[in-house]
Amino acid sequence: MNNLKYKYYITSLVFILSYTSCDVLEEDPFTQPSTENFYQNETDALAALTASYARLKSGIGYYKQQFMPTLFASSDQGLSTYLYNEFKRGIVTSTNQSLNNLWKELYLGIRDANNVIANVPSIQMDEELKNRIVGEAKFLRALHYFNLVRCFGEVPLRTTPLQAGDDQGLPVSSIVEIYDLIIDDLNFASIYCWGRNEARGNYVNDLGRATNTAAHALLAKVYTRIASCKRTASNGIIGNELYLGFPESYQTYYQYAKDHCDSAISGQGFNLSTSLDDWISIFDANNGNNPEMIFDVQGSSLSGQGTAVSNLFTPRNAGLSGSGFGGNNKLKPLFINNRIDKFDNRYQNSIITEYETLTRQFNINQWSTGYVPTNLENGNTLGTLWQIWTAKYIDTEATTEYTSRQNWHVIRLADVYLMRAEANAEILADPAAANADINILRSRVGMSEIDYSSMPIENFREEIMRERAVELYMEGHRFFDLTRFGVYDEYCRFIYGNVDGARQPEDYLWPIPIIEVSTNSEID
Amino acid sequence: MVKKTDKKIIMNKYVLILTLLFSTFAFSQQINLKGKVFEKGSESPLAGATIQVVDSEVGVISDFDGNFEILLLIGDRIKVSYVGKQTVELPIIASPISVFLEDDLNELDEVTVSVGYFDISEKDLSGSITQINSDKLEKNRSGSVESILQGQVSGLVVSESSEPGGGSGISIRGTNSILGGTQPLYVLDGIPVDPLTDAEGMSGSGESQSSLSFINPNDIDKIEVLKDAAATAIYGARGANGVILITTKTANNENGNDKISVNYESYATVVRRNISVLDGMGFENYMNQRVLNQVWQDITNPNLYSSPFDGTQEINLENFPVIGTGPDATSPIQRVLPYLTSTGVNTNWQDETYRVALSNRYNLNYRGGDFKRNVSVGLGINNQEGVIINSNNKTINLNINAKRKGFDEKVDIYTKTYFTHKKGNAASVGNGEIFQQRGVVSQTLQFQPIYSLLEPGQDDEIYSELNESLPISNPYTLARYVMDIKESTSFRQTLQLVGKITPKLTATFKGSYNFQKSNRDNYYPLNTTRGRNTDGEASQAFLENSKLYAEGNLRYRNRFKDHRIDATLVGTFEKNKIRSLFNKARGFGTDATTFYNFTSAEEILTPISQFREVGLLSALFRVGYNYKRKYFVDVNARVDASSKFATNKKSAIFPSIAFSWFASKEKLFEKYKNLDELKLRFSYGKIGSNPINPYQSLALMTPIRYNFNDEIITGFYESNLANDDLTWETTDQLNLGIDLGLYDSKLNFTVDFYNKLTHDLLQYVQLPPSNGYSSRVDNFGEVENKGIELSINGLLIENDDLNWSINANIGVNRNELKQLNSNLDFQLGPSVGFSQAYPIMFMVGQPLGIYWGAETNGVYSNWDEAIESGIAGAAPGEIRYLNHYVDLDENGQPLAIQEINFDDYVKIGDPNPDFSYSFSNDFSYKNWDASILFTGQKGGDLFWVDSWQLSGLQKTTNILSSSFSNSWIAPLAYQNGSYVYDESIGNLNSASHPAAILETGSRAIASDRNIFDGSFLRLKNINVGYNFNFNNGNSMRLYFSGQNLIVWTDYPGYDPEVRTYTKNPQKRGVDFGTYPGTKSFLIGLKYNY
């Protein structure tokens, strides 16, 4: 007699379960679109490319923060925070966190660029724009790999999107293979990227995007590195011995470098500042993307778009940068006195000569090697602070650590002139061939012209380093210059002494980070 | 069955009531007997009772109203029986009759245990279950459920949090899972619940507090802890970490009375111990010693001087220019000691930051009604202060349970309501991302004692000199001014219908809705380190979780002679909707609006919003069978389907089987008079776990922003690789148990052996970052946990005046990672501490989460030793790291200078305890009662992150007194402006800590110097009470209780049991500025009306 009720219960139970079952187990993430419906049109192509740009500063390891101070600490320019002591002492270990952050973010950039390069070509859209997008992605991929190969040497070379199930990791490739990819990518970019701010059809190449000129400039930098590293490796610099794998003579690579310098210098839309005042203004936070800057990582005061550059290289609490713990990177007197011409207008006009914090005022000393602090309360002078701040990254409107509008200058036109000077001199083994380009840079800032005619090439190399240093100090080039010229040990010992300054051949490259080594069975 | 021999005893207690309405003396006359069967106690009709004429085949079953009719002869005897009731046999002399059946005494006396969807007698249990009843709860006065459980259950380990309102972590039978954590599944009155979850806090603002605070311990009637597969398989999908069932109090047994109890408690809490760091003078000595040591290290350095100091030369600038500190060689100034004259300041920052915290708890409880309809109301208020100034928490709990037997008493209707509100300020205990952002506790130990509190008008600038020329907040400022306000509200309503469809078949329907909301608001004001850097930094966050739960449940119970069967069919449905929002802003420039208003902020970060839905469907079928209550078999099969997994991998079957044998009921054991119970249990089953976030199996795009020339544009990138194989993490568990009861069950032993093998481990599989994806959620690897649990309880003395019982538990667990990703044999854990080392390792063949780092052997005495070592950075007074891996050059020759790096690291510790134990005594003498509980643990290493600074002697921050007094000291004094060699004051050869020195070597390496033995024995709880029994039946209890009064341990930090990451299985045993462990003293009064 109770069967009916029993049945009723079972039925209702089954009903409840079946009613809800389909719907409950299906997943529909509201906040993220699925990959399947992507790469359909022009908007998607641009959005995917934007992500590759965003990687330049998406995490703290790369251009947003740590990359520049680690390069600075690794060089011989001066004082940095103890956080980068391993770099300063040349004892970088695979567990170093900055190294791990950098590595991860470089490969995120490569992943996103690979996705563009693999998926965008099949989209139906304006062909010219499509090529530009792929060209920009290739430029970015080349930049990432160039940074990788310069810092780590042989690394895994991933050029296509990762497929599910294929994630055990790649072995490292030789640096020749890596440079081949970099060169291919940049050649493509130099053809298909557009000019500075160039308009074609309905589209404008926004300021800040990679241009054909930027591709040439970066190619010049790539070839200059190959050339100089090969040269020094042949002369017994073990730290550069991987470059012995390049087949042609170093002069040939210098020739390639020179060719691309020519192309870059004739590039549309870019030009050197013409006076000292102009030169000073290229570092003005209000003057980002000025025509001397060939490729910059973009800083902005817009929400989440700032960089830490101002904070890191400018004194704290002086109203010259956002608040924060930065202000750790300073030039050392030994460097100022010995590695540059400290009376050069470019040095004199790109350093901070006075600043004031809540309690003290700091005035530069007579030798431009330090500051004399004065207690604001009682006017007493305190002991000299032996360090010099650069004025290249001042941003008085930045409020906090990551709100600076200051761009990171990846490559600027003056660097291209300096490379051409170096290439010309090296190709002919005649320093006089460098005169023209060096003097363009000197005379625009009011410095007397130089004639390298009678100088032996070995001495010229020191001179070109001094010129590069005074023009480009604290812009992220010095560490790479020290290694490619094979003087890393010598220069660092001079500044930091025989204990902290000693550099072994293996210090020319940083170790592959532990997060890679421990997960990639193809790498020991 | 009632044995004849027992009849006398039973007659005494027999509660058969036979009512004769008519009596005749006619015999052998056939009558149609009409009768009705009732349940004694509730006096409700009993449907489905069997009425059988003795010695015949005639029998009927009572109908829905308990009525029956049967044809028989006057003088016949009938037998009336019913499952779970005593069988009654009686002669028939008249009709009609009423028969009242009493619960089977054997079964009534037995403790019933919830095994999940139903209760069974403890004697019929095949699984491993521990019950804690309200008596025990009453004795252990504690604010949280987790700490009540501590020491009560073998195999259950609690990692405590002392923060007011803080959440503790629990692990049962070791750690199975890397990602899954160790948190068991909590089931409250039959409904699975998710502990309260905090909304996201700002980084560095302390750990989140998810915890069990949704339930007031005073409302709990009993707690069951389910440990083995036989028990937890009922919860299949989520049972892998064990299941904790909580049953709240009802008024079922009040027999029509109204009862009120009022409870007031007041308690004082203090930091368990202060850590001895240097005082003002000591710190100045330390600062001076840094210079002396540096000078000695320099002048004896053969790399600097061809004739280094040998005790004879004069120590001046001419002989040793290195003792000058000038900017270049042209202007040397001799190094001087910084504190030749004392500042005279001595601030004890622990005194400034910690306090005696006074807290109060109030509880009001009403219970009234009878078995048929009753109501129970519990209201609790806990107003708690933390030992760190400005930290507090206030919790209000309301719990209402009501029941009615409706529809002619055929359907039981229950409603249960739980409401909780919690609000408190957590104080910024946590450490930030960088060195300068030390949290309150780390800062309390490290802040310089020669600095004072800020005077009005001063700011942190005055602290900058010794803090890397940065203005850093003192710990008092941090604790006092940083706001970290956590507020949560939880409302839970359950409705339950239980009806008897037939006498042997019960149907239950449960529906439950749970709404949780939690807010977390942070503000770092301008006068704090972080607020200064960010110009005021605020965040607002909320998290909302609504959950619907429905369950249908059929239970069939029957008995055929000696066979009993108990079968259950359950279907459940669960759906969670979670949404959250996190907003952050910086650059306020003023503290006027703190986190309430973002309008004045310069930089408002992109909000992070999340919407998630998670569904779970389950069906369970269980059959329990026993023969003569001697041989038991339980078979369980559960199917679970979770939305979180890949399309074709959502469902899984979790079966289990259990056997048990009540051996002591066999004739064989009859001769052992003192043996009351011997039971052997065996169980085997599969259980699962799905502790991952949803959407992990899908390939998804994520938005990201960039700007070109100051214009923002949005892009999308591929953030997830699809994983079509993502599925359940499964644990196979085998359990063997023995229950032994001796001397009228006054002495009981329970032993369990178990082996758990967890496979398809859900984890963030770390991929080579060069792939572009550095991790992915996947099923990989195997973990084994095996162990023994033993518990003993004994009633040593039992008489009218005096009772004494003891209880002891011990649990031994061995944990081993059997297998990892196919091609790797180790995986690094997360980075830890400011220097972000990777000290945690998951390695095949080792327990989970071992510590990995450099091995050390004291410090170098002198340059000869240092140079001989051939290790980079070796110098007198530096830590002697062992070089386990010889670095070779291209030709295979050892490099002249060896570096200490990851290759040289070895296992330096293991956070898994060897065993944990507890021991308790309960006494009562007349109106007095007392209980005392010890808990302890052997092994279980801790990684004390702060020891890097406190024992590293590398900075101008404060250090442990003991580290300084055992450090390397140069035999050098400074007298009248010059350095003087004095052999008697040096400590070069017997130093266990490195030198205080200006330029230190590598001291931030994770090494065995940071690992400490976590063994302890703790007087967890002591409780003394006196009961006043008044004539009118009212009673009052006055009691005193103390918690954590004594702890025996070698751990130099605050407390070996208090952890920073209580719920993160990847960072077990890490102490990184944890809220300090406390002890407390409590006085309470409870009045029962």
Image (tube, coloured by chain):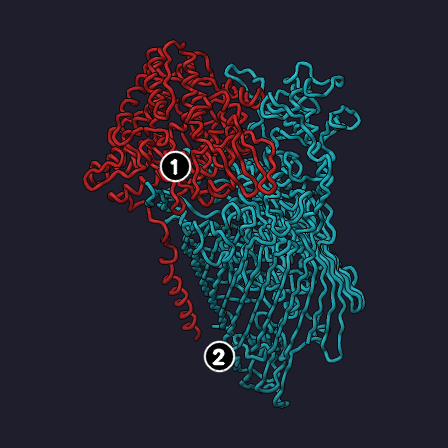
Chain colours: A red, B cyan
Asked whether the viewer can see residue A95, the reply is: no
Question: Mark 1 — on which chain does it sit?
Answer: A
In the figure, A256 relative to B820: above or below? above
Q: Amino acid at mark 2?
A: Phe
Classify residue B440 as left or right of residue A312. Answer: right
Classify residue A165 as left or right of residue B878. Answer: left
Query: In what element is the residue under mark 2?
Result: loop
Q: Nearer the viewer, mark 2 or mark 1?
A: 1
- Tag 2–tag 1 contact (CB < 8 Å): no
Question: Mark 2 — on which chain does it sit?
Answer: B
Asked whether the viewer can see residue B76, the reply is: yes
**Residue that badge 1 annotates:** A284
Q: Are marks 2 and 1 on the same chain?
A: no
Figure disc tally: 2
Classify residue B365 as left or right of residue B179. Answer: right
Q: Amino acid at mark 1?
A: Asp
Instruction: Give the quarter of the figure containing the C terminus of chain B.
Output: bottom right
In the figure, A142 relative to B219: above or below? above
Residue B407 shows which numbered tag?
2
Please state the horizontal and vertical placement of residue B643, each as a whole percent of the image.
41, 53
For image coordinates 74% across by 65% down, the residue present is B1039
Please state the horizontal and vertical placement of residue A429, each as a whole percent of the image.
35, 10
